[in-house]
């Protein structure tokens, strides 16, 4: 597999073409941003952790019936993935109140919901990724009703799998964000990453935050938290 020209640089990853038009290489950076890029920093070693964690989890999700873009881990920071057209939605699943849910509704943090919630944000930096409802997704033609039913079903399957996985590792899955893509044959698969950048993960015993909120909220101990959550994953797989 030959790595060709860089196609795109995002906030946390670079994407390269390969000599196979159906495959891309993603390269994970240590760069961290928050609040739509207004806060910028570096988390040393994050790229390696996010790459390895996302791949370990996506391998297991594929076995659990959720198709993903993962093809092969090429190096500490690089992964071969299927090329997809990203559905421009952030699919957010919540088990416990935190983050923008608490801010939007003035609701207490740390309340476990009777059922997980699934919500969508429209991926558009210029608009600050606004919350979007299903009728508006359909009205704008961002996805079809059939695709949205599948995306919701996959998101809840990912949640059930990740809740069990992290619980067994002594970690509580509070919430997370997924992105989905369309393959050339029109099927929907899980894309992007599953990492401490995109999940809230709290130590089940102490409540300590082992995720990017340490960076977002200036809590300190950011690198240590990423190393600790990776250690939990490795001990458990
Ligand atoms: P929120 O509470 O800020 O809406 O975040 C919900 C989840 O989504 C949380 O686990 C962090 C993740 N997330 C991202 O992965 N990217 C983002 O840009 C934002 C805002 C949140």
Image (spheres, rainbow, N blue to C red):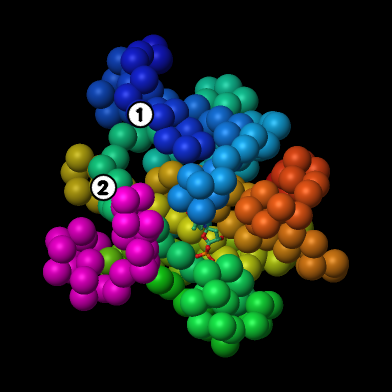
Q: Quadrant of the N terminus?
A: top left
Image height check: is 73 above or below 100? above
Q: Which residues are magenta?
A: 120-147
Q: Position of residue 217 (x, y in %)?
A: 67, 57
Along the line of sight, the residue nearer the viewer: 221 or 229: 221
Q: Around disc 2, counting alpha carbons within 10 Å, would you say few (fewer than 14), some (14 to 19), or many (20 or more)?
A: many
Q: Is residue 136 magenta?
A: yes
Mark 2 or mark 1, which is nearer the start of the sequence? Answer: 1
Instruction: Tell me if residue 202 comes above or below residue 179 in the rendering.
Output: below
Q: For the image shown, how many numbered marks are present on the structure?
A: 2
Instruction: Give the residue drawn at x 35%, y 64%.
Output: 130
Q: Is residue 60 above or below residue 200?
A: above
For mark 1, what is the residue?
A: 8
Mark 1–mark 2 Cα distance, whole angstroms, equals 18 Å
Q: Residue furthest front?
A: 38
- Dividing the picture into quadrants, the one containing residue 106 is bottom right
Q: Residue at x 66, y 77 (%)?
A: 109
Identify the residue position indicated by label 2 in the image: 182
- Residue 234, position in %: x, y? 74, 43
């Amino acid at each position: 597999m030959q790595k060709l020209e860089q196609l795109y640089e995002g906030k946390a990853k670079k994407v390269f073409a390969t000599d196979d038009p159906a495959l891309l290489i993603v390269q994970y950076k240590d760069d961290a941003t928050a609040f739509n890029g207004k806060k910028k920093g570096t988390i040393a070693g994050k790229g390696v952790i996010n790459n390895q964690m996302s791949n370990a989890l996506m391998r297991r999700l594929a076995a659990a019936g959720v198709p993903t873009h993962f093809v092969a881990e090429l190096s500490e920071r690089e992964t071969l993935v299927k090329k997809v057209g990203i559905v421009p939605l952030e699919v957010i699943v919540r088990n416990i109140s935190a983050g923008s849910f608490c801010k939007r509704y003035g609701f207490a943090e740390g309340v476990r919901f009777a059922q997980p919630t699934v919500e969508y944000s429209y991926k558009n930096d210029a608009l600050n990724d606004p919350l979007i409802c299903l009728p508006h997704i359909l009205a704008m033609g961002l996805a079809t009703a059939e695709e949205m039913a599948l995306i919701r079903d996959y998101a809840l399957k990912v949640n059930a799998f990740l809740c069990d996985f992290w619980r067994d590792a002594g970690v509580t899955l509070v919430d997370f964000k997924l992105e989905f893509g369309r393959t050339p044959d029109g099927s929907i698969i899980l894309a992007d990453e599953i990492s401490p950048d995109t999940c809230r993960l709290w130590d089940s015993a102490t409540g300590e935050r082992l995720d990017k909120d340490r960076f977002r909220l200036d809590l300190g101990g950011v690198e240590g938290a990423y190393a600790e959550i990776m250690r939990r994953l490795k001990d458990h797989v």
